[in-house]
Image (cartoon, rainbow, N blue to C red):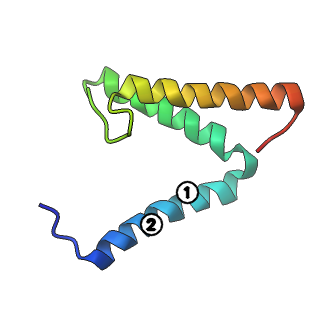
Amino acid sequence: MDERTPAEKLERIAFAWCKVATAALILGPYVLPVAASLSAGLFIAAYVRGKGDTQCWFRHPLIAAGFWLGILAVWVWVWRTRGIVW
């Protein structure tokens, strides 16, 4: 049972977004491919080590990894063909 107070729950969410904002500040326009690569790699590593489910919306580590690899592929394609970085 979750015994956190409402304030602690909000702070936990805020801290998660703080980490995202910090990565964006450091990596700038490359935060999406770095995050997608790390996410896919870690989902695959978790699956290889026996984790058959995930908290992600996709529920299965390999599906989540495939989604993020697809996002990475689109980012690389746009970057290579148009020179645009989001």
Which three-letter amino acid code belongs to the residue tagged 1?
Val
1 over 44 or under it: above or below: below
Cα distance, mark 1 to mark 2?
A: 9 Å
Residue that mark 2 sits on: 15
The residue that appears at 41% across and 65% down in the rendered structure is: 13
Q: 32 or 6: nearer the eye?
A: 6
Apparent side of residue 4 relative to residue 68 in the rendered image (left or right): left
Numbered label attached to residue 56: none
Disc 1 element: helix
Percent from the top left, x then y, of residue 29? 74, 48
Is disc 1 surrounded by few (<14), some (14 to 19) or many (20+) residues within 10 Å? few
The residue that appears at 44% across and 66% down in the rendered structure is: 15
Which three-letter amino acid code belongs to the residue tagged 2?
Phe
Is disc 2 surrounded by few (<14), some (14 to 19) or many (20+) residues within 10 Å? few
Apparent side of residue 20 relative to residue 2 in the rendered image (left or right): right
Percent from the top left, x then y, of residue 10? 37, 72
Residue that mark 1 sits on: 20
Apparent side of residue 32 relative to residue 54 in the rendered image (left or right): right
The residue that appears at 49% across and 23% down in the rendered structure is: 66
The residue that appears at 33% across and 24% down in the rendered structure is: 47
9 over 80 or under it: above or below: below
First reached walking from the N terminus: tag 1 or tag 2: 2
Residue 60: quarter of image:
top left
Looking at this rendering, what residue extends furthest in the left direction? 1
Disc 2 element: helix
Percent from the top left, x then y, of residue 51? 26, 28
